[in-house]
Image (cartoon, rainbow, N blue to C red):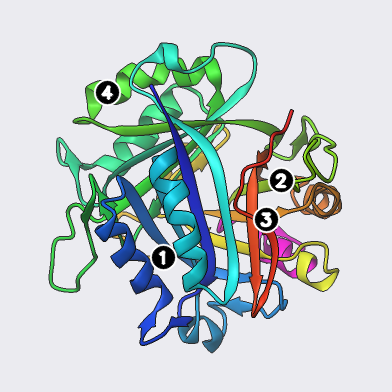
Amino acid sequence: MTDYLKLTAYFGERQRSGSQFVAEAMLDLFTERCVDTSIMLRGITGFGTHHVLRTDESLSLSEDPPLAVVALDTDAVISNLAGDIAALMQHGLITVERTRLVDQPAAIASDTGSARLTVALGRNRRIRRTPAFAAVCDLFYQHRFAGATALLGVDGTADGQRRRARFFSRNRDVPLAIIAVGSTDQARAALPDLQNTLVRPLVVTERIRVCKRDGVLLDRPPALPATDSRGRPLWQKLMIHSSESARHDGQPVHRAIVGRLRQQRAAMGATVLRGVWGFQGDRSPRGDRFIQWGRQVPVTTIVIDTPENIARSFDLIDDITAQHGLVTCETVPALLALVGGERRGGLEPAVYP
């Protein structure tokens, strides 16, 4: 068991840092620092602090799609990296969150709470002729997790080595991340099966709260103060897992959420990531067998903001997910919002209940 930090940067793909794109400079830095695990995920729609919508329904996405770049490593590595990542960006959002690398079930607390497991593996790895990501999603489904989504990376590092997707390549070890939501007891039960299925899997866990499942309201995001005891701001994150085929008033659920949040300015931003395989609830895992986009694929919508704005955003999301979707909430200990020369928040983690 090792305590890790997770750094995530959200920004537009065409943002530059000097002569380089920020994304390229970021991955070069991860490679130079031998960051244990990282993955670059290309979004399909979203907006940031300027509330400019980028979507694959228009040319705006091909011009400047949203990116989410995630790096996982020890406290020392991520803490030394965070300031350098912020220096590369002019616009966007950076979060630092606590997570735990687990290698045995005892490392996952056994109680009545919920947990998110994230499994990192190569995108074209196979298990007995089955794509590894499909086999892992099936495993989580058999353990009756609330949901799991496989997210395809386009660049990243594995064991500190650069793994970039190339057109004429099998891309065997380009990173792919599987996010699974279940109870802590389910997570403890699933870990040995994961270790038997995969060779030296990298698995990290985070504590979360499940707010909705299959349209049923289970709990609201916890009410938090604006700052901790030392005056550092507190932040919260909502993740909404749905399917491309799920609809609200004739619109895909994820597009309805982004449109409502942007229209009512309930949040300072949102990012939607499209998966390639996964499930929510009792529906068996499904998606795109040949890594092509289709209506059955899972999508994950991410909203991060102050506790006050998260409460407002959740009211809108609760209405849109009245029939579909898995909604989770968690506390984010550090967030830095960058808007040109202005900085809001910081990268020093807050202490929260």
Residue identifier under label 2: 236
Residue 293 - label: 1
Among the two numbered marks 2 and 4 on one chain, the one whose residue lies closer to the N terminus: 4
Residue at image coords 48%, 45%: 6
Distance between mark 1 and mark 4 Cα atoms: 30 Å
Above-or-below relation of 342 to 221:
below
Residue at the location (55% across, 58% down)?
A: 244
Q: Residues within 10 Å of mark 2 (few under 14, many from 20)?
A: many
**Which residue type carries mark 4?**
Gln
Label 1 or label 3, whichever comes before in sequence order: 1
> Alpha-carbon distance for marks 4 and 3?
32 Å
Q: Is residue 46 in the magenta section?
A: no
Pointer 3 residue:
303
Hey, what amino acid is under mark 1? Trp
Q: Total number of numbered labels? A: 4
Residue 256 covered by magenta stretch? yes
Q: Of the two numbered discs 3 and 2 on the same chain, state the one appearing first in sequence.
A: 2
Q: Does 171 appear above or below 104?
A: below
SS for callout 1: loop
Label 4, on which residue?
A: 195
> Dot 1: few (<14), some (14–19), or many (≥20) neighbours within 10 Å?
some
- Please report the bounds of the magenta region as a residue range: 243-260
Residue 127 in the image: x percent, y percent? 18, 36
Rendering coords of residue 184 (x, y %): 54, 19
Return the residue nearer the eye: 12 or 276.
12
Element carrying mark 3: strand
Camera-near label (3 vs 2) is 2
Residue 111, by quadrant, is top right
Q: Which mark is residue 146?
A: none
Q: CA distance from mark 3 to mark 2?
A: 8 Å
Q: Upstream in the sequence, badge 1 or badge 2?
A: 2
Q: Nearer the viewer, mark 1 or mark 2?
A: 2
